[in-house]
Amino acid sequence: MTPISEAVPTSAETTSTLSYPVARTVEQTDDYFGTTVSDPYRWMEDVDSAELKTWVDAENELTQSYVAEVPTREAMQRRLMELINFERYTAPARRGSRYFYSHNSGLQNQNVIYWHTGLEGEPKVLLDPNTFSEDATVAISGLSITDDGSLAAYSIADAGSDWVKWHVRDVTTGEDLPDVVEWSKFSGASWLKDGSGFFYEGYDAPKAEALKAANYFHKVFFHKLGTPQSEDKLVFDRPDDKELNVGAQVTDDGRYLVLHQSKGTSPNNELAIKDLQQPDAPIVRLIDVADATYAPINNDGTLFWLLTTLDAPNGKVISIDLNHPERENWKTVIPESKNKLSDVSIIDDTFIANYLADAQSLVELHRLDGTFIERLALPAIGTANGFGGLREDTETFYQFSNFTTPGTVYRLDMKTRRSTVYRQPKLLFDPSLYETEQIFYASKDGTRVPMFVSKKKGIALDGSAPALLYAYGGFNVPLMPEFSSAHVMWMEMGGIYAQPGLRGGGEYGEAWHDAGTRLKKQNVFDDFIAAAEWLIANKYTSAKKLAILGGSNGGLLVAACELQRPELFGAAVAAVGVMDMLRFDKFTIGWAWKEEYGAPSENAEEFAAIYKYSPLHNIRAGVAYPATLITTGDHDDRVYPAHSFKYTAALQAVQTGANPILIRVETRAGHGAGMPLSKRIEATVDQYAFMVRALGVGGQR
């Protein structure tokens, strides 16, 4: 790849000529516990208005004209397509004699679902979402197969919306049954053992503005095959609390329906049990206080194994007998470790415990009495996911990846405990040219924070290299080693990629997560800022050549940090971010985030904390902010796009100096899930072209 620094105009050379589209202001104020807060761009919350569409179109045109002037943009797009163009597989799941998995030949917009009989049977297409719409913006969002492998319930999402529609396909014939279920959201499908129907989650049909209206009173329904949705039975709901999310899962033995209840995005939950062999028996509230995480693993008759954080913030495995469900009778099977227990399954009557050790996978095998057997040998430092199946299975599959290893599928023989490569992608670059190290740095309050740093071997650490700092820091989500073709392209061009595991995430258990929530959210921003300072102090990069990137909660992170420390960054890319922290709870599922952020209109102390960092409310006039690109989707019903619109208009209105403030609005796209590959490539290339131009940097392969 040719150097990208040649003939690349810098921000200072061209931005002074930028003319931002006019965004009118209105007289709108709100009172929060005696504090008057203005909201001059409130009109942008009407995302369907003709006025806003005109503004969005003009902003998109401006952004495209900016990135189009990067002379190596086309070369970057060609190289990214080359790096992405390899076969990708997911770990297969066995149902009956059939194995199901998804596959992408390389540049297909959507993954295709296949099945075959036996491990090496002839692949047959089950679902090809590339045929669902002309623009490939209709995607599969959920899939559930009956135990015998004969039927598949699948949900589809249109244009990235969280709303999904369920269909049922006959696996053998490839034909859909007439069954259709609508107005489902945040839902799976769990079949009865005999395949006569499935449980799913959803809401009552919205009365207006389906992509904007708040969603309350989540419910569990049962759909019987061959009947219209109007006859679906309401199985479980909690009318006493409109903010509870509910979920239903049939146990592997088919005997019980486990009903999960959680408040918003809190990791803590309640559990209830319905005996499916006694339809008239009342639902039993097994755990009626959401004082910890209680995640069912499996059961042996009335004996249930659960992963819990009760008195164990890193997680442990306990057993509960339904015949003696009192807490004093609960038994610890696998005690808490120094590492976070992120997932547990039972295969061949053996616990497979997947831990996080300093943000990388560590997998242990234990007997059902909890006795340690051995640690699974993984190929390298990285991330291992999967390990699904039934208790009686003698095999399971997992996928392993890291920053320079695309997802490789392994088959684990539970009798020999040996892993063998099942499907391995062909590499389109030489991973031996790159290296990854994990460092630890001190945050503002002295907290030790981990960070992975990947780069091409031999790069001089003299502060001249461009660096991309990416993080998330929220909702108990861990950032682990993961392969990205875009990151490889960045490193080929001489860039350094850095990924810290901030507080608020799930890298070190619930205590780590809690340390970045509500009144402690500033810890997350401090951790991110400290990561940038470490990279600069240790000469991995310089402030002018440091770009920051984050999406969703990570978009909030990027925006808050660029406002707090504008001199520390050369470029900022904030994707689908939560920017108006005083009104996030007013749209779609935003109210659920109060468990994470706090309740700005209900709690004075939480309002005060949020108001100090809310991006929309901390923009200062007379400040030269970094070159900034905001991105969103016009159909984003997770983080309502008005967040990005309002933040962009407000930042453009006060920006001092030459650095551009731009927004890119993807059409027929939501929060990111299900976006066609072609759109993802275009969006990624625009982001990297923006960073290249904003930083005025280059490199070569």
Image (tube, rainbow, N blue to C red):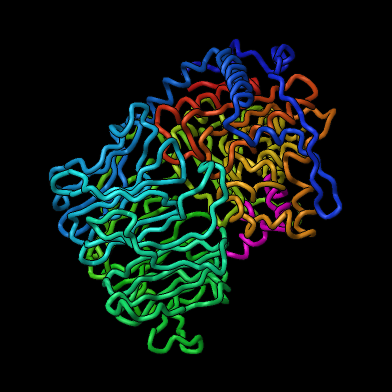
Give the answer, above or below, for where 149 lies relative to 661: below
Nearest the eye: 234 or 57: 234
Q: Residue at coordinates 39% horizontally, 78% vertically from top-left?
A: 370
- Report x, y in % for residue 645: 65, 32
Q: Is residue 494 above or below residue 29?
A: above
Segment colored magenta: 502-528
Residue 357 visible, this angle:
yes
Residue 685 on image: x %, y %: 50, 25
Q: 408 or 612: nearer the eye? A: 612
Q: Quadrant of residue 369?
A: bottom left
Residue 541 falls in which quadrant of the image?
top right
Q: Nearer the viewer, residue 208 or 693?
A: 208
In the rendering, at what x and y percent does residue 336 appear?
A: 51, 73
In this picture, is 388 found above or below 213?
A: below
**Residue 124 highlighted magenta (yes or no):** no
Q: Position of residue 547 (x, y in %)?
A: 64, 32
Is-magenta flag for residue 520? yes
Task: Say which residue appears at 58% left-offset and 38% top-offset.
Answer: 576
Would you say 265 lies left or right of 561 here? Answer: left
Residue 146 lies, with reference to residue 313, above or below; the image says above
Query: Which residue lies at the image location 56% right of the left edge and 72% below the top edge?
Result: 290
> Disc count in the image?
0
Is residue 508 among what the camera can see? no
